[in-house]
Amino acid sequence: MAAGLAVRTIDRLRDDAAGYGRALRRALWTDAALDLLPGPYGWNDGGCGLLADALLSLVGDDGRLMAIVGNGTTIAQHFAVQVNLRHGDWYLDGSGATRFDTLLRRWERVEGIHGARLTPAANADGRQTPRDPAVSERIAQYIRDHVG
């Protein structure tokens, strides 16, 4: 990946994280984007690791791969990319760009993960989540083409 692409994405996030998040969410929840996934997945049910790897490639060293785990477990339920911006941390995933409290509240209330908490992905067991660098690169290219 060219460094200029990472700078462009992170600059857009710095300028307007919420706006970038809305554009990302709109682009991802289309048939064309979902067709990039290798199975009967969505961005929140099996495709999150592929998407997180794609997003991490777009933000470069400004991003950190994070996992959502439930109370008393290290099994990853979801992956997101943490980006520290001037107004605090934002988390990128299939829902766009959200703040910490919003992300955890969604995974507790909507997805039913009791005691949802964030941890660095290296501390979580993500073996059940599909990962494929070639698929993630196609997703990253799609995001570059449709979101910037």
Image (spheres, grey):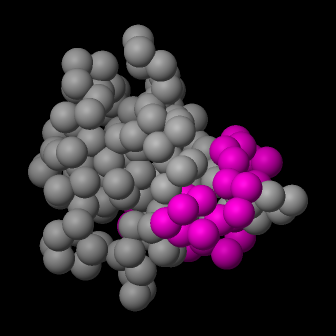
The answer to whether any part of residue 118 appears in the image is yes
Which residue is located at x 69 percent, y 48 percent?
117
Q: Quadrant of residue 58?
A: top left
Q: Position of residue 40 (x, y in %)?
A: 40, 87
Q: Position of residue 78 (x, y in %)?
A: 57, 61
Using residue 58 as the reference point, say whether residue 47 is left or right of it. Answer: right
- Residue 90 or residue 61, whichever sits in front: 90
Q: Is residue 78 magenta?
A: no
Which residue is located at x 29 percent, y 29 percent?
17
Which residue is located at x 22 percent, y 37 percent?
20
Quarter containing the N terminus: top left
Using residue 31 as the reference point, say whether residue 120 is left or right of it. Answer: right
Q: Quadrant of residue 5?
A: top left
- Residue 52 or residue 3, whichever sits in front: 52
Quarter containing the C terminus: top left
The answer to whether any part of residue 56 appears in the image is no
Which residue is located at x 25 percent, y 78 percent?
35
Q: Is residue 125 magenta?
A: yes
Total label count?
0
- Residue 104 or residue 142, whichever sits in front: 104
Residue with the most extreme right position? 72
Residue with the most extreme left position? 146
Q: Which residues are magenta?
A: 107-136
Residue with the most extreme front position? 109
Residue with the most extreme bottom position? 40
Q: Quadrant of residue 11?
A: top left
Q: Position of residue 44 (x, y in %)?
A: 45, 67
Using residue 105 as the reference point, say whether residue 120 is left or right of it. Answer: right
Q: Position of residue 119 (x, y in %)?
A: 71, 43
